[in-house]
């Protein structure tokens, strides 16, 4: 539990974190169905063109593994948690937000840069474009653990020197780096990682996200971004592509377009939230516990909490 003494020195200054694709699971919307926040599901469905209630309540894991289904489902579940958290503790002090990959769109909505309708529409268009790109050029991703980013980057560069299509996709923590590329190249990473004394885990995805494999999705996403209004917002959002704090505004069109093919600088993002924006605690909002886990491994001295169920206190 977190001590809340509003207006005192013990009040946390939260940096709120929103998860990306990969945390989806069947029936993850069930706990929220009886809450006032559930009305968001209808709004997201109308704006995105997906039956989000079905995805959140009855879809199986195979259905949810589709890139477009996963993204709109996680986006909605995150907004349900955010809405309920704000309803439950409206005085909680949020000083900044950030989201991992897809989660950046949830963060932009939470910061007031995007409306719920515009965020849902963008996530729908992004998910469809990325799914189409993955069908055109199937790929894979794997997390490499136990080595620092320079060591994993050296492995990737060696693979590319041998002709492999492999790139660094996510800098998740000081000892976890995600790589993406062709299925052959990612599979070969296992042998290279083992030879270097590292561990690896292939991710359950069919797309090489945050790599040049996603370039075909860029045209559709840029078109959607050009049609979207980006407001000033209420708190800073730390962007994936440059790990810098940004207010709202039209420059998010370029940041969002670049994010499609650029690595997620998550380790640097957490440090900026804590060291530059003075957040004293991280709050992982939405399904899963991935981001609170990464925060604890990156900055163990900063408390990392979760808000994942209705009427819960951060824990």
Image (spheres, rainbow, N blue to C red):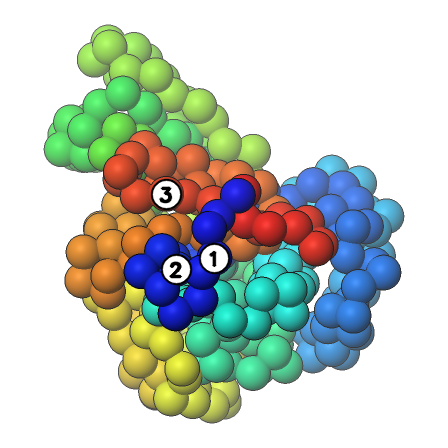
Label 2: state its secondary structure.
Answer: loop
Q: Residue at x 85, y 60 (%)?
A: 34
Residue 83 picture quarter: bottom right
Q: Residue at x 44, y 23 (%)?
A: 201
Which residue does the numbered mark 1 point to in the structure image? 4
Q: Secondary structure at mark 1?
A: loop
Percent position (x, y) of residue 254? 31, 76
Task: Say which quarter of the image contains residue 208.
Answer: top left
Mark 3 or 2, closer to the camera: 2
Relative to 102, residue 166 above or below: above
Find residue 260 and report its horizontal and vertical position in percent: 39, 61
> Going from the N terminus, do you reach mark 3 or mark 1 first?
1
Residue 167 is marked as none
- State the residue at coordinates (54%, 54%): 285
Q: Position of residue 149 (x, y in %)?
A: 19, 34
The mark found on residue 11 in the picture is 2
* Residue on which the image places disc 3: 303
Q: Is residue 248 above or below residue 195?
A: below
Between the C-alphas of marks 3 and 1, the distance is 14 Å
Using the image as rendered, state which of residue 275 and residue 12 is in the foreground: 12
- Does residue 215 appear to the left or right of 308 in the view shown? left
């Amino acid at each position: 539990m977190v001590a809340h003494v509003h207006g005192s020195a013990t009040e946390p200054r939260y940096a709120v974190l929103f998860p990306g694709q990969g945390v989806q699971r069947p029936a993850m919307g069930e706990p929220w169905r009886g809450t006032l926040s559930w009305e968001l599901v209808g709004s997201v469905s109308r704006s995105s063109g997906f039956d989000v209630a079905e995805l959140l309540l009855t879809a199986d894991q195979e259905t949810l593994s589709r890139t477009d289904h996963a993204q709109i489902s996680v986006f909605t579940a995150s907004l349900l948690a955010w809405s309920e958290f704000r309803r439950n503790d409206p005085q909680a002090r949020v000083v900044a937000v950030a989201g991992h990959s897809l989660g950046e769109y949830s963060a932009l909505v939470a910061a007031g840069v995007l409306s719920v309708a515009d965020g849902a529409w963008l996530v729908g268009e992004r998910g469809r474009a990325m799914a189409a790109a993955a069908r055109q050029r199937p790929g894979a991703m794997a997390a490499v653990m136990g080595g620092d980013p320079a060591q994993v980057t050296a492995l990737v560069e060696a693979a590319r020197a041998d002709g492999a299509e492999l790139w660094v996709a996510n800098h998740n923590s000081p000892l976890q780096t995600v790589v993406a590329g062709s299925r052959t190249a990612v599979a070969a990473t296992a042998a290279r990682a083992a030879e270097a004394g590292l561990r690896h885990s292939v991710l359950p995805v069919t797309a090489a996200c945050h790599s040049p494999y996603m370039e075909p999705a860029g045209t559709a996403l840029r078109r959607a971004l050009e049609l979207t209004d980006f407001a000033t917002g209420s708190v800073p959002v730390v962007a994936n592509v440059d790990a810098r704090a940004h207010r709202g505004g039209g420059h998010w069109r370029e940041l969002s377009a670049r994010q499609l093919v650029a690595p997620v600088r998550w380790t640097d993002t957490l440090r900026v939230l804590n060291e530059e924006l003075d957040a004293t605690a991280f709050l992982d909002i939405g399904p899963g516990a991935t981001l609170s886990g990464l925060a604890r491994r990156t900055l163990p001295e900063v408390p990392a909490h979760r808000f994942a169920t209705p009427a819960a206190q951060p824990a």
